[in-house]
Image (cartoon, helix red, strand yellow):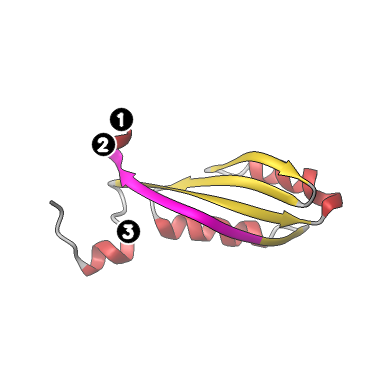
Amino acid sequence: MRELTRRGLLTAGAGDRHHISSAVVLALPERRADVAERLADMRGVEVHASEGSRIVVTIEGPTSGMLGETLTTISAIDGVLAANMVFEHAEDQEARS
């Protein structure tokens, strides 16, 4: 069993855990295709569906903080009205192998 430490909580176990989240991005309908294309080009982001003004993505990275930073970057894209994390999961790297 791993020891829970303050640093481990703050860094979310950086380096030995993998984080993934799903998010819904709300874009101006006339900009949705452009926004989806920009999202697909972002490191760690995968577009799964888009319709109307909604785009469903997953974001992957080594820390929860990195996922948050990516979501903040997405929110600042021209044409994006909102970006909301729906779910987050983290697992040990060795569990992924």
Estimate the x, y position of residue 78 in percent, counting from the top left.
76, 58
How far is disc 2 from disc 1 in space, using C-alphas?
5 Å
User: Could you tell which of marks 1 and 3 lies nearer the N-terminus?
Assistant: 3
- The amino acid type found where label 3 is placed reads Ala
- The amino acid type found where label 2 is placed reads Glu
Q: Which residue appears at 33% of the width and 34% of the height?
A: 96
Q: Which residue appears at 69% of the width and 47% of the height?
A: 55
Secondary structure type for disc 3 = loop
10 Å crowding of disc 2: few (<14), some (14-19), many (20+): few
Report which residue position mark 1 lands on.
97
10 Å crowding of disc 1: few (<14), some (14-19), many (20+): few
Report which residue position mark 2 lands on.
94
User: Taken as a whole, is the magenta stretch helix, strand or loop?
Assistant: strand
Estimate the x, y position of residue 37 in percent, counting from the top left.
72, 41
Residues under numbered marks 2 and 1 in contact, where contact means CB atoms less than 8 Å apart: yes
- The image's mark for residue 12 is 3
Q: Which residue appears at 18% of the width and 62% of the height?
A: 4
Secondary structure type for disc 1 = loop
